Amino acid sequence: MKIQLVTPAPLTLNNGNKITAQRWAGMLKKLGHRVKVTQNYDAESCDVLIALHARRSSDSIQRFHKRHPELALIVVLTGTDLYRDIRRDRKAKQSLELATRLVVLQQMALSELPKRLHAKTRVIYQSAEPLRVRFANISTNFKVCVIGHLREEKDPLRAKKSRPKRREIPATAGWASYRIARPGKFWLRAIWPASRQRWKAAQTFCRKRLPAASR
């Protein structure tokens, strides 16, 4: 099968959208398909179009549907789509309707979609290669580092909200609490001001053995 995979990210950048597109392309190629990764639909003949982002790839989605309404059009919904764009952006909403299949990356995403779209939506969980690890007492402090484009729709305070209360930690855990590592100064300047103090207040300490990835 000939597949074109559209990602809105410039292919010169090394960001999450590009990495996702490359990983999916690699897996599809291993299954025997021919895959071309592009930033926009180029009107080249293909059997199916896979588009990352309902809003940012909306022009490609509309062009492909207009040229080939009979072919499969798969739209992969990102967090930005689910928790922001499909709620208020006309093009994102139109992409949901044009898609022959919608893909989400976790089960709770279905609650963000109209029920009439559930039948054509599939949940595909992201995967990762397991790492060989060794345990080493590299620190007496256990730090949790949250990495990513921490915009409001990404819910960057989720790590703080999910930390267990002291009374909920079993005695066998070997640690009393943990620390959410403070973001860098650049990110603190970029995040909306109301959250800066909340991030600082989220920091606590812990003592626990850490798994260190073997080299």
Image (cartoon, helix red, strand yellow):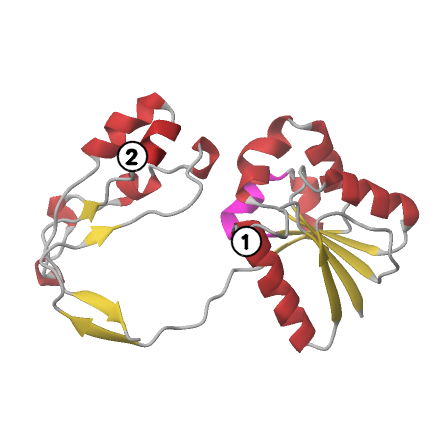
Image coordinates of residue 43 in percent, x first then y, are: 87, 51
Q: Split into 4 quadrants, where in the image is the C terminus?
A: bottom left
The amino acid beneath tag 1 is: Leu
Q: Main secondary structure of the magenta part?
A: helix
Q: Marks 1 and 2: in contact by CB < 8 Å?
A: no
Magenta stretch: includes residue 16: no
The amino acid beneath tag 2 is: Lys
Image coordinates of residue 93 in percent, x first then y, are: 70, 34
The extreme front residue here reads 12
The extreme top residue here reads 194
For the point 41% across and 37% down, the residue is 155
Label 2 environment density (alpha carbons within 10 Å; few <14, some 14–19, many ≥20): few
Kindly report the distance in space between the C-alpha atoms of the residues bearing marks 2 and 1.
Answer: 31 Å
For the point 21% across and 36% down, the residue is 202
Q: Split into 4 quadrants, where in the image is the N terminus?
A: bottom right
Q: Circle 2 sits on which residue?
A: 185
Image coordinates of residue 95 in percent, x first then y, are: 74, 40
Q: Is residue 43 left or right of residue 177?
A: right
Q: Is residue 124 left or right of residue 64?
A: left
Q: Please indicate, yes or no, whether residue 15 appears anywhere in the rendered image.
A: yes
Q: Quadrant of residue 132?
A: bottom left
Q: Quadrant of residue 130?
A: bottom left
For the point 90% across and 51% down, the residue is 68
Give, as a single range, the part of the protein colored magenta.
104-113
Q: Circle 1 sits on which residue?
A: 105
